[in-house]
Amino acid sequence: MSSLEEVIGYKFRDKELLSEAVTHKSHATERGVLRHNERLEFLGDSVLGLVVSYYLFLKNPSEDEGFLSKAKSAIVSRANLARWAELLGLGHHLNLGAGEHLSGGSKRHSILANALEAVLGAVYLDGGLPHAEKLIIPWLESQVPGQLDIDHKSILQEIIQKTHKRPPDYEPISEAGPEHEKLFTVRVCLGKKTLGLGSGKNKKEAQQAAAKNALDYLATHAVHKNDL
C-alpha cells in the first residue's frame, strides 16, 4: 500500500483502514471476511460533500443555491470521481473478487468512484478533516467547469423530491434506427405532467437529456398539484 500512500500524499497510521478502503465486497465475500469498503464509502461521500460544498461556498460568493448545487453535482458525479481515481491509478490497488476482476472491475467507473470515496473516508478517520481537505482541495482547484459531467437526473430528482415529496418518472417514448445506431427518446414526468423530452444513443443518455430539458422548463414554470 506504500505506493498508493505516496500517490495520495498521506501516510496511514492504521494501515488496516487503507486495506479496507480498497477491498471490494466481492473480494471480502470470497474470502469469508466481513470488512470491505462500503461503510467507508458512505463516510467518504459525506466528507467529500462537505469539503466541496464549503469550497464552492467560499469561491462563489455571488452565486445562488441553484448554481452551487449544480456545480457540486457535477464535481462529485460518478464519472468525474472515476476520472480522479484513474489519475491516481487506484484501480491497480483494488482487491476484487475473481469474477469482478475478470469482468474488468478495476476499470469500472462505479467501482473506482466508490473506492475513491472509501479512501477519503479512511483518510478522514485516520487523520481528521484537515488531511482529507489536503487531498481534496488540489483536485478541486484542477477542475474545469466546462469539462464536468453534470448529472441532470440527480439535480432534477433533488428538486422534485424537495417540492413534491416524490421522484420523477422516466417513460420510454420510442426507439428508432438500426440496431447499431439506435436513437432512444424518453419523457420525464411527474404524475400526468410532462416536464421534458430527451433523446440519446442509449436510454441513460436520453434520460439525462430529458432531465436537462425538464430543469430548463422548471426554471420558468411552476408545477402545481392540480397539474398532476
Image (cartoon, grey):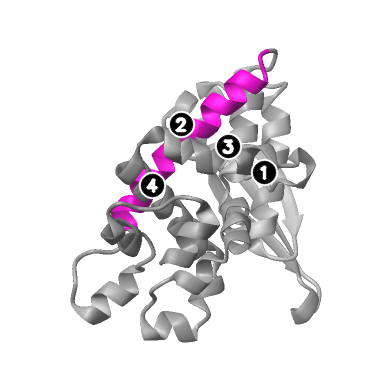
Q: Quadrant of residue 63?
A: top right
Q: Which residue is mark 1?
A: 150
Instruction: Identify the amino acid type marked 1.
Output: Ile
Identity of the residue drawn at 76% across and 71% down? 182
Residue extent of the magenta highlight = 38-61
Which is more N-terminal, label 4 or label 1?
4
Q: Earlier in the sequence, mark 2 or mark 1?
A: 2
User: In x, y percent, where is residue 192?
Assistant: 56, 38
**Which of the two discs, 2 and 1, sits closer to the camera?**
2
> SS class of the residue under badge 1?
loop
Where is residue 222? Give x, y as percent. 63, 20
Sequence-wise, the earlier of marks 3 and 1 is: 3
The reply to whether callout 4 and callout 3 are in contact (CB within 8 Å) is no
Q: Is residue 42 magenta?
A: yes
Query: Which of marks 3 and 2 precedes in the sequence?
Result: 2
The residue under label 3 is which amino acid type?
Answer: Ile
The numbered mark, 4 or 3, whose residue comes first in the sequence reads 4
Q: Quadrant of the N terminus?
A: bottom left
Crowd class of label 2 (few under 14; some 14 to 19; many from 20; radius 10 Å): few
